[in-house]
Image: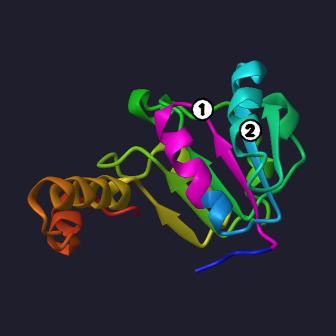
Amino acid sequence: MRHEGQTRVVVGVGGAARGALLPFLEQAPQELVIANRTLQKAFDLARLGALQGRVRSHSYAALAGLTFDLVFNATSASLRGEFPPVSASVFAKCSLAYELAYGKGLTPFLRLAKNLGVSQLADGVGMLAEQAAEAFKWWRGVRPDTRAVMLALTVPLV
């Protein structure tokens, strides 16, 4: 499914953010913003994707007043029960808030998104299960069905 015209922000620049960069750009968003506390790291990751589409880098503070259709939290803040240091304004037109951490239920990030009216919330269970299935296929030649795994690992986001 393509999502031309959408704007997205990836918060954080670790390995998972790097792994999500090209799949995000393959969906042809209007713009993808990479935000991080260290602007140079955001710039370096944005530069990797610049040939595939419109990618900008920002500090967390520079996100104030900007809005996005999708907000993807790739920071480790939720592992500590913290909220990534971004303005609530990023959720103003957001239809999907994606928390990379899984099994935590409503993290501070997802709770804020929900309280601000974001209609779809998701955590990283799907990404975890699908990556494992691809690795299993690579090693064993057969791709397992991931539905049961996702159901077993899913914590309700209510």
- State which quadrant residue 113 falls in: bottom right
- State which quadrant residue 8 falls in: bottom right
In three-dimensional space, the C-alpha distance between marks 2 and 1, rounded to whole angstroms, equals: 9 Å
Q: In this view, does 110 lie above or below 45?
A: below
Q: Where is residue 131 in the image (x, y as percent from the top left)?
A: 31, 54
Q: Where is residue 134 in the image (x, y as percent from the top left)?
A: 26, 59
Q: Where is residue 14 in the image (x, y as percent from the top left)?
A: 52, 30
Residue 114, visible in the rendered structure: no
Which one is closest to the eye, mark 2 or mark 1?
A: 2
**Residue shown at 56% from the left, 59% from the top:** 23
Q: Does the magenta portion include 12? A: yes
**Residue shown at 82% from the left, 34% from the top:** 58
Could you tell which of marks 2 and 1 lies nearer the N-terminus? 1
Please, what secondary structure does the residue beneath circle 2 have? helix
**Residue shown at 69% from the left, 38% from the top:** 48
The quadrant of the image that shows the N terminus is: bottom right
Q: Would you call the spot at circle 1 few (<14 residues within 10 Å), some (14-19), or many (20 or more)?
A: many
Q: Count the labels in the image.
A: 2
Amino acid type shown at disc 2: Ala
Q: Name the residue under label 1.
A: 13
The quadrant of the image that shows the C terminus is: bottom left
Residue interval drawn in magenta? 5-23
Amino acid type shown at disc 1: Val
Q: Where is residue 108 in the image (x, y as percent from the top left)?
A: 52, 42
- State which quadrant residue 13 falls in: top right
User: Which of the pair 92/51 is nearer the observer?
Assistant: 51
Q: Name the residue under label 2.
A: 46
User: Which of the pair 2/109 is nearer the observer?
Assistant: 2
Q: Does the magenta portion include 31? A: no
